[in-house]
Amino acid sequence: FGLFQETAEGAVAGKGGWLFTAEEYENALGADLRFANAIDTIVGTAATLRTHDIHLVVALVPDKSRIYSELLRANRPAPVLGRFATARALMLENGIDAPDLASALMKAREEAPVFLERDTHWTPFGAQTVAQTLAGSVRAHSQNRSEFEVTPAPAIAHSGDLLNFVETGPFAEGLGLLPETVAQFDIYPINGSVGLFDDPAPVEVVLIGTSYSADALWQFADFLGLESEAEVLNLSQVGRGPFLPMAEFLKADITAENSFSVVVWEIPERFLTLSEF
């Protein structure tokens, strides 16, 4: 790695020690069909939820290599470059609420990093930026409000998932590939959701997604609750992509004894065309 910036299959070396997942470069045979099927699934999901008076908000997470493209050493395929804009345009044409997270993260990165250097995922600051961008849509379709208290917590040293594809032996420190520091916060509701006559109100907001949402290290679910002033039921799962957890949610009887009014569906853009999903 030190001599040739070579990594094992699964990661791509960028400039300045940055690493990117090779999945963000993938444009394998059948990508167009997978993309079309993914959009159809999203549109169909929105329609199904609508029949139950549940509003879908799609959190289409742009690729890390899109937000930090100037740090790439290798160009990505042309079809991949237009994937985010095309997908979001199709969602908007079909009446799906899909805030522009790419623009929000591009602006926020001027203040602080929004993705980790050696991990696929966003930083807590990136997660909070996305939560802020989605909050208006969530509040517009929910009624119960919660107050939250936020206090700084000890930061955590984290070895990024992309380091698994880099063989450094004893030279990690010299190559600048040490664990990164991830800021942490204690975020919790002060009084819970308040409903009519101050009775505890049921949770209205559901979060479904991938490890961007499921991994507590990024605190996305906490930030979503904080910024939306709503308690959030997090049904995200690690290692299963965005579509399987949503399919399981739809198979459950979502009309029985629930008061869900908003579903936030976090979808990393690369999953729209990944061959393994």
Image (spheres, helix red, strand yellow):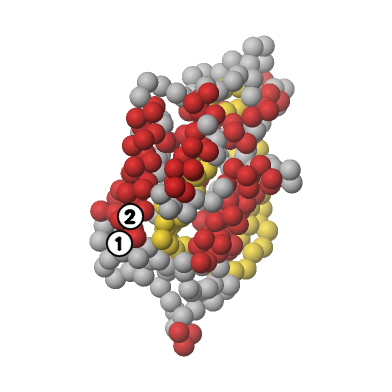
| Residue at left offset 52%, top offset 31% | 82
**Secondary element at image label 1:** helix
| Residue at left offset 46%, top offset 80% | 195
| Residue at left offset 44%, top offset 47% | 93
Q: Residue furthest bottom?
A: 197
Return the residue at label 1.
51
- Please report contact status of discs 1 and 2: CB closer than 8 Å, yes or no: yes
For residue 115, what is the image quadrant?
A: top right
Q: Camera-side residue: 46 or 245? A: 46
For residue 274, what is the image quadrant?
A: top left
Residue 237's disc number: none
**Secondary element at image label 2:** helix
Is residue 159 in view from this perspective?
A: no
On screen, residue 129 versus residue 213, left or right, reads right
Residue 140 at x, y percent in the picture? 51, 67
Is residue 40 in view from this perspective?
A: yes
Spatial CA span between label 1 and label 2: 7 Å
Neighbour class for label 1 at 10 Å: few (<14), some, many (≥20)?
A: few
Q: Is residue 39 above or below residue 173?
A: below
| Residue at left offset 26%, top offset 68% | 256
Residue 120 at x, y percent in the picture? 55, 35
Q: Camera-side residue: 125 or 88? A: 88
On the rendered image, what quadrant is the C terminus found in? top left
Return the residue at label 2.
47
On screen, residue 181 versus residue 83, left or right, reads right
Residue 70 at x, y percent in the picture? 68, 28
Q: Camera-side residue: 265 or 12? A: 265
Label 2 sits on what residue type?
Answer: Ala
Q: Is residue 228 above or below residue 209?
A: below
On screen, residue 117 versus residue 120, left or right, reads right
